Image (cartoon, rainbow, N blue to C red):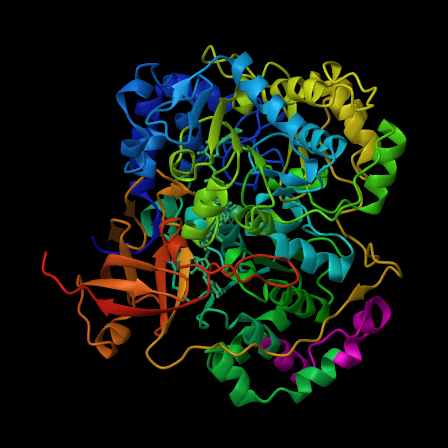
Amino acid sequence: MKPMKAGGGWPVIRYAWRKAIEGGPLRLFRAMRSKNACKSCALGMGGQKGGMVNETGQFPQVCIKSLQAMVGDLQDAIPAAFWSEHAVSELQNWTSHRLEHSGRLVQPLLLRSGDTHFQPISWTEALDRIIAKLRAISPAETFWYFSGRSSNEASFLLQLLARFYGSNHVNNVSYYCHQASGVGLTSVTGSGTATLSLDDLQHADVVFLVGGNPASNHPRLMHVLMHVRQRGGQVVVINPVRETGLVNFRSPSELKSLLFGTEIASLYLQPDIGGDLALLSAIAKRIDEIGASDEAFLTDHCNGWPELRAQLQRFDWPELCARSGVAREQIDQAAQLYAKGRNVVFAWTMGITHHQYGVENVQAIANLALMRGMVGRPQAGLLPIRGHSNVQGMGSVGVTPKLKEAIVARLESHFGLRVPTTPGLDTLACLEAAHAGRMRAALCLGGNLYGASPDSAFTREALARLDLLVHLSTKLNTGHVQGLAQETLILPVLARDEEPQATTQESMFNYIRLSDGGPTRHAGPRSEVQVIATLAAEVLHGRGTTLDWQAMASTGRIREAIAAVIPGFEPMATLDATREEFHVQGRLFHAPRFATADGRAQLHVHSLPTLDCEEGRLRLMTVRSEGQFNTVVYEEEDLYRGVVGRDVILLHPEDIQQQGLAANQRVTVRSSTGALPDIRIIPFESIKAGNALMYYPEANVLVGRAVDPQSHTPAYKNIAITLDPTPHCR
Ligand SMILES: Nc1nc2c(c(=O)[nH]1)N[C@H]1C(S)=C(S)[C@@H](COP(=O)(O)OP(=O)(O)OC[C@H]3O[C@@H](n4cnc5c(=O)[nH]c(N)nc54)[C@H](O)[C@@H]3O)O[C@H]1N2
Ligand SMILES: Nc1nc2c(c(=O)[nH]1)N[C@H]1C(S)=C(S)[C@@H](COP(=O)(O)OP(=O)(O)OC[C@H]3O[C@@H](n4cnc5c(=O)[nH]c(N)nc54)[C@H](O)[C@@H]3O)O[C@H]1N2
Ligand SMILES: [Mo]
């Protein structure tokens, strides 16, 4: 299979048709048009403006990822006989694709250590087991992991249960995702999310896109980028891989673009993996050198400019070029292009956060933006392109190990709750504690903790040391069968468009959507809030809480509580009556007054990391293919990069030659953490030499547990590896 010449286009249209047939065209269309937030990425669409409508009211907004997610949920139920027909040992060898396509989970399931098969059990028995365990152990021995699809209501309620119970070990998937953005942005503007709205973005004339592959992961962003170019604006891409869709994109919704393609990147910079900090500093240095910095803005609205300028002046050019892997002329071009922009947006994704200095990367982006006054005004700003459709909302409503002081104070006054004072642990730290025998039970609201975590062998051991692991899930995944505890329980839950009550979600533009819910598709699964409220009522019984937990199963009641407790969410109190969706207050910065103590933005000074790559080693990034959503693999092929199969490593032809290897040869890939045997070499011209690409989640065997000290995020994108030829013929 050859790499494609453009992203989007006819293959996308064909795929959409295939999905439509799979889901039933009319049924799928109805489901997509229902007033529920999209289930795919955090760009957000749907809600009260109608399905396939974005937050500026534009219709139709659709991408194949949203269809994929919906078709997954429209599947038939997994038949009861499935569980006696397939032993766990068999399911452990199934691919992610096959597990996902087994159908919807509809029965609670139990697997105890030594059992050969999952056993369907009643809801009563499942809940009793959890209640008995939580009553028997200490709250400090429990952790609570949240993925990013569940509602604000379910998330708020579950973290409330955890705090009342006595555990602060509450964390969401951000610790594997955008935590570096949250920490980095907070250190700059005092607020941890995007500083601009979708409408602002749609008026930008220059967009920097750093470390993301939106053609596959945020397809609707491609239209925004396309329109920037069509308006005469510029797009600067920073990525070690020349991603096809960022070079040229054929929009299925515009005939001219579909037929001829639209150029996306005006300038494509290819740093080495991890070279961003040096590259961003280099562009900043050049901006200063050519006198393009906004001195008045820096003096009036920022702290730290003299220090930053002095540091930029100290950096010398050969070192910046060597450490970034980008030539000086290209750095100059980027600076010139930036200097000409009037409304400039800086957007970034996992290529920036998945490093041991992810926070510094984010701060370096912010430095660059502030140098020309691009934060704190309309139509420009900072935009972390978030992953899961409600991962941001979860963080907002309290799914964090350390709550903001204002939230603690309001939780205590509103509910009479004494928020536990023992420090809460982040996601990986919870696994470390489990491995050390300090955790006994965990509850996962969605997701695939096993598949998403680094160092798969270690994670498997950590989970095996838990007495009880509970999943609230919609569909089967690799984690359910491979990451087993002494006792593993799966509780089947409803997707948001099947909820009997309305729920809310927050987009990456800080926009709160109201989802209507809809008819239940199967008998068996329960609403997440109902399950959580039932558990809370029983687990907390006799522990001195007077809260009527059964009444908290009403999402309207939960919204009232969120409005009272979470700063910026006050309009939530009247949302049911007005149905008016809103931007969280205090987050969009349209004027240069920031949420810091003195109202000024903070610049940061960094030293440059060494890209430690010894002779003979390569730097490996672990990324998504076109056909997957996180740990769920829908298709075995990676359409745009032209790759079939997932047991592959993509290398620049120069590296293949230098290592004395050949295309299609099988090798063992080794890191200091683990080894993956029998991996096929794929020549890939589009990657910068010296760097390698493999697919997540399989490659998590190789990813180490060292984290960014500030955001606690693993370096999923920077792993030193060696390759050994596999000594046998096939
Ligand atoms: N279809 C689909 N949509 C998704 C997801 C999905 O799996 N499938 N996942 C969702 C989630 S949770 C998230 S977080 C996002 C993820 O969206 P992305 O961040 O776009 O996803 P990744 O595939 O992890 O990798 C991103 C890009 O980072 C580049 N990169 C790697 N290392 C570096 C580096 O050191 N520097 C720079 N500048 N770039 C680098 C890679 O070449 C790749 O193009 O997408 C969300 N949307
Ligand atoms: N090596 C490597 N590892 C990575 C990454 C990487 O780039 N490289 N990326 C990281 C990132 S950015 C992320 S976000 C994580 C993702 O980590 P997770 O969020 O933990 O994993 P997902 O694969 O998104 O979880 C999918 C499962 O969620 C469940 N689910 C789906 N919809 C719902 C719902 O409505 N309700 C409930 N209760 N359950 C639902 C289904 O059972 C499905 O199988 O992985 C991280 N891990
Ligand atoms: Mo993510």
436 left or right, relative to 28: right
Say left or right for 393 vs 269: right
* Residue at (26, 63) in percent of width and height: 668
- Looking at the image, which is closer to me, 13 or 588? 588
Residue 322 point in image, percent of width and height: 48, 84
Which residue is nearer to you in this view: 458 or 583? 458
Task: Indicate whether residue 289 is drawn in magenta.
Answer: yes
Residue 334, quarter of picture: bottom right
- Residue 361 image position (x, y, % from top left): 60, 66
State left or right for residue 704 relative to residue 289: left
Q: Position of residue 121 (x, y in %)?
A: 45, 15
Name the residue at 61% across, 53% down: 384
Quick check: 470 left or right of 113? right
For the record, the magenta segment spans 283-307
When asked about the image quadrant of residue 390, the answer is top right
> Of helix, strand and loop, which mostly describes the magenta segment?
helix
